[in-house]
Amino acid sequence: MKPLQGIRVLDLSRVLAGPYCTMMMADYGADIIKIEPPGEGDDSRAFGPFVGEESAYFMSLNRNKRSMTLNFKRAEDCGLFKEMVGRADVVVENYRPGTMEKFGLGYEELKAVNPKLIYAACSGFGHTGPYRDKPAYDIIVQAMGGIMSITGPENGDPTRVGASIGDIIAGMFTAYGVMLALFHRERTGEGQKIDVGMLDCQLAVLENAIARYVTSGSVPGPIGNRHPSITPFSSFTAKNGYIIVGAGNDRLWERLCNLLKRPELVKDERFSTNWQRTANVKELNAILNDLFKEKTIEEWLSALEAAGLPCAPINTVDRVVNDPHIQAREMIIEVEHPVAGKLKMPGVPVKMSRTPGAVERPAPLLGQHQAEILRELLGWDEAKTKAFFAGR
């Protein structure tokens, strides 16, 4: 038994933010019915890399889901969707605001069909405010949300975060909103609309950048790998590459100084407290880099770990995928796709003792499950399903 077993979700979303949200729900048992436009389907089916003709990008985000196709430019398809809404718990969409209303399928119309419906809309800028009608991609909200202005080498150019966190964080917040709404409905029987803006989500994760600005008036900029208010907490140059060391308090700082055979640094007025170390970070990092250059990454990791100091190599993706801890945690799993064959992808990160999530089916082929979905939801037989879709 999975925690979301029995929850039926009509997923109209495409590409990344919405599919990431519904993938999180699917991994924990929700029945995700992915509704795609006929012909091409979700845009991301055409995004590389490919295994044969199948998109690995699409497959990694749409596991555990079933697919059917609807064309909302046809009144019959809109009518069928409303019938399905009557038997659903959640609708997820990431269209630009106003699009669903043009089809006659906005929240108010769907709420009239199913008052208990939870309607989750994830868009670039949300359904209110002066930017609501602007189009958005991940890089747009990373730029507007400020995170690019604090990412990159010190005094360097603004830099996009390597993963699409504009979309992914919005997808996570949307899933969180759906969970809150399901909990509320469990207690009251009420459905509701969830409005998530990707830009809002970027602001929500800026943590101390906003705190630093509103308390000091100074505008944060990129500072490379170091932490703005904890020192030493950065990357350092070893003989054969970079190593991360995080001495997050005075106790760890003293331990690091002893390990480096420089105990006098503990009493040095420039470095005796975290505030002073941060104020004099350039001088301190110059000293530490000279010391770390004396040994290899592997030698330092062994010594630092033995001393109980937080440390890490800066792994490349191939090293992460093959890391023994990642393997032990089942964070790289293999899925058998009916066309693409075996494909490795990230596993399920939240480990639950009683109701664990799992990846049990591959991403669907376009329209693969429409006959079984309509049979289950509406009792349609095969002849009725074929007749409906034959008019495409």
Image: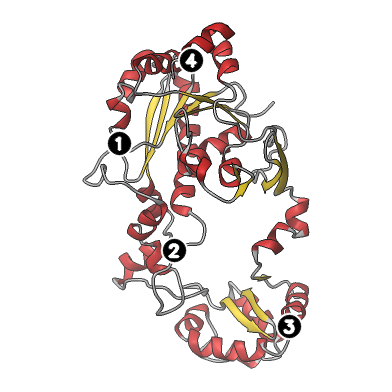
Q: Nearer the viewer, residue 342 or 289?
A: 342
Is residue 1 rendered to the left or right of residue 377?
A: right
| Number of numbered discs visible in the structure rendering | 4
Give the position of the C terminus as an image quadrant: top left
Q: Which residue is mark 1?
A: 97
Element class at badge 1: loop
Q: Nearer the viewer, residue 131 or 14?
A: 14
Which comes sooner in the sequence, label 4 or label 3?
3
Give the answer, above or below, for where 227 lies relative to 350.
Answer: below
Q: Where residue 353 sits: x, y (%)? A: 72, 37
Which comes sooner in the sequence, label 4 or label 2?
2
Which comes sooner in the sequence, label 3 or label 1?
1
Q: Which residue type does callout 2 highlight?
A: Arg
Between the C-alphas of marks 4 and 1, the distance is 31 Å
Between the C-alphas of marks 3 and 1, the distance is 54 Å
Q: Which residue is mark 2?
A: 160
Which is in the foreground here, disc 3 or disc 1? Answer: 1
Which comes sooner in the sequence, label 2 or label 3?
2
Other-residue count near label 2 (Cα within 10 Å), few / some / many at <14 / 14–19 / ≥20 = many
Q: Which residue is mark 3?
A: 296
Element class at badge 4: helix
Between the C-alphas of marks 2 and 1, the distance is 26 Å
Between the C-alphas of marks 2 and 3, the distance is 30 Å
Which comes sooner in the sequence, label 2 or label 1?
1
Q: Which residue type does callout 1 highlight?
A: Pro
Question: Is the C-beta separation of discs 4 and 1 under 8 Å?
Answer: no
Other-residue count near label 3 (Cα within 10 Å), few / some / many at <14 / 14–19 / ≥20 = some
Question: Is the C-beta separation of discs 4 and 2 under 8 Å?
Answer: no
Q: Quadrant of residue 140?
A: bottom left
Q: Which residue type does callout 4 highlight?
A: Ala
